[in-house]
Image: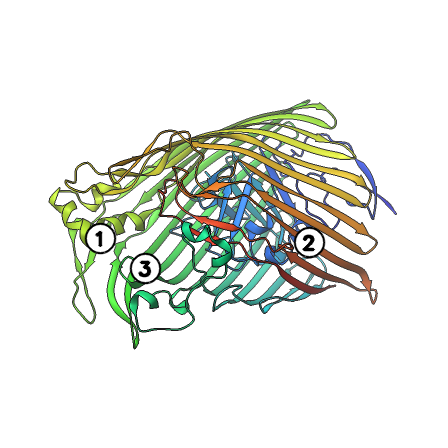
Amino acid sequence: MIRTVTAGLITGQLLIVGTAIAVDVKLPEVLVTEDRIITPTRQIDESVSTGSEISNKGIELQGSKAETSVNEAINLLPGLNTESADGRGLSGEQSTMRSRGVKGMLGALTVEGVPNYGGNPIGPRDYLYDLENISTIAVYKGAVPADIGTGVGSRGGAIELRPDWPHEKFGAQLSQGAGTDNYYRTFLRLDSGKLSNLDTRLSGSYSYTQADKWRGPGELGPRHNFNLSLTQPITSKADIKLWYNYNSIKQDLYRALSFTETQSLDANYYKDYNAALTGTAATDINYYHYNHGDFINRDFLSQITITPTDTLRFTLKPYYAVEDTKVLQGNAANNMVQKRTRDIERTGLISEGSYGTKALKGIVGYHFEASTMDIYMQNYAPTAAGLSYRGYAAFAAAGTSATHSPYIKLTGNAGKVDWQVGLKYFNYAEPASDGYRNSGTAPNYPLVRDTWLDRSSRSYDTWLPTAGLSYTITDSLQLYSSYGKSFIRPYSYLPLVSTYTTSTNINRFKAAGITLNNLFDGYRMEESDNIDLGLRYRGNKLEITPTLFFGLHKNLLTTVSDSRVTGTPISYQQNVGKAVGYGLDLEMSAFVTDYLTIFLNPTWTSMTYDGDITYQGTRLASNGKQVVDTPEWMLKSGIILKLGDFEIAPKVRVIGERYGDVEHKEKIDPYAVADLSLSYTRKKVLNQAQLKLSLDFTNITDERYVAVINSSDDTRAGATSYYQGAPFSAIGSVSVQF
């Protein structure tokens, strides 16, 4: 059977790695047979930005680890490096992601344009969703269009999730997975189809996931996820969509290694927290159940769309999000177990109007959000009877913050030329907070007011221009360039409070007349200027997209010494750092035959410090050195072979050497990890259902390597912690869909 598809259509059982192509760009149609496997680019309305989109089929290729982790789902894209302490996407906050050398926690993640983020770290919560409920994931690196990436910032790029809204016909999907380390996952989704003449459509899903840690005592999970969505036409020109997502996960944490321990990796590969209590505090802070996290998130969004004419559209997106998190973790500095609590509530509205013709399209929008974040720490002493309360380590009472962000974007087409200009204004108003300290009185350790810990209200703002131009040289070849300014609002609050309130520091600060508020006077928004220059070639047998990128980064959080304090210097982070980044991304897919596709995605990145760093009065020789946890070279590659109903997809990820400190005293060796996915799909079982059997093998060579480098961009030698990469694992699954 022959069918006609545009070059923007996604088909087949494979990863879709594509570069953004504007709707108005004229590209040739391609005739393909039903069995042909292709990796065409996907349209995301941007011909002048470096954006890529992965379809639901692409998410499937990443296997079980991509079912619960957005970062794992996109990890085959060039320029991105996701590392995790666990190989199944279940260690949500013991993972890292960098985009062109910039931490992913500094980027934006949105669902249908609605921001997702938390506090300390402030960035995206990539573990909140079942990816079976997501149709596509759009990823932007470098310049981010003005109407993309609302929220707290986009220095680390922007990721936009597009929900798989309720289907037109009744249907169900049931999948069951099981694997090594007692891995177990059940997923069920039901679609109502049209419930009445009103075209009401509902979908609901539930998943249960659990596994043992691959090293040490403890479990990952249970993880419960519930999702409910609705679409309802109001009139022929208006409709409403509703989305609710609930996610909870309990997680026994993995123990980190020191750099010295990484140098004897074989001997320490399975080192983890202790399985039993000993009665000694210095040992019991490493008891596994004293290193544990409970994470609960509830997200609600709605989208009201009114289309008065074919060229005019208005959209309102009210939303509400709540995060309740408690993390226990031992602290060797004081032999205490600290409980970190995050109670976050966000309420917001995105309003947008758009007007579009073939030659000109304009978008005007406004994002408002009010949020409260109660983030504090409490100390507990390990005793023979269990944990004994010792009061607050850090506490502050604050009001409600407000975000105001209007934006405008214009795009146009004139023959072979596409252009875009945009401008966003971001303003964050932070409320004043009253300071309290622990009185030190047992057993309740009541809090007492301390005006030295008060913080005044502040406002941070910036203008964010974007511009881009593309030229269609031939029907299959396009040249494009883009510029965009990105940012992240101040976020590292608890470390600053902890530095000030430490018993050895607070009296010295007071003696110098320095309040906690004075330390916050040095906070600014981190900002980056990004330029991309790229080519897109799209032929029947080859698609290749090389992109040169350049970025200037300023106001980076960098550790400095406070000269106002006499005696031993006290250091803390301020926004005074600079860095320069440039490199090359390459996306390439070769369609060797109708049944064989090869993809090759290398990246070369230079991201270096622009100046030395001073810590505790000592100058660290960081100038010109590669930023921590940033490999110069990366390669993601693989093949997809289809033999009838069978699909074989071996993949490899090669990560170059990285460093855990700014002076490059702690070198982490390069590594290569190979995965293998096998699947069998039968489309018409009993003339109704589709049956899919899958086997996912990760790290098939059982490579032992360091995955997560847990450090700041200004970390000195001896302060970094490291997490081992997961060994070989196997997960099988059965999925039925009808």
The three-letter code of the residue at mark 2 reads: Leu
- Lower position in the chain sequence, tag 3 or tag 2: 3
The type of residue carrying mark 3 is Asn
- Point out residue 329 in the picture as x, y percentages from the top left corner: 36, 62
Q: Element under label 1?
A: loop
692 sits left or right of 396 in the view? right
> What distance separates the C-alpha of mark 3 from that of mark 2?
39 Å
- The residue carrying mark 2 is 676
Q: In which quarter of the image is the C terminus?
A: bottom right
Q: Residue 21: percent from the left, percent from the top?
A: 65, 34
Residue highlighted by disc 1: 502
When the figure is inspected, residue 406 is found, relative to residue 326, above or below; the finding is: above
Q: Which of marks 3 and 1 is nearer the N terminus?
A: 3
**Above or below, comparing residue 320 to residue 529 in the picture:** below
Residue type for callout 1 = Thr
Rendered location of residue 328, percent (x, y)? 37, 64
Residue at mark 3 to residue at mark 1: CA–CA distance: 14 Å
Mark 2 neighbour class, 10 Å CA radius: few under 14, some 14 to 19, many 20 or more: many
First along the sequence among labels 2 and 1:
1
| Whether residue 303 is visible | yes
Q: Tag 2, which secondary structure? A: strand
Mark 2 vs mark 1: give the one in front: 2
Nearer the observer, 237 or 200: 200
Q: Within 10 angstroms of label 1, few (less than 14), some, or many (20 or more) residues?
A: few
Q: Mark 3 = which residue?
A: 331
Is residue 165 left or right of 492 when viewed as pictured? right
Residue placed at 17% from the left, 64% from the top?
Answer: 440
Marks 2 and 1 sit apart, C-alpha to C-alpha, by 49 Å
Q: Nearer the viewer, residue 307 or 457?
A: 457
Tell me the quarter of the picture where residue 53 sits: top right
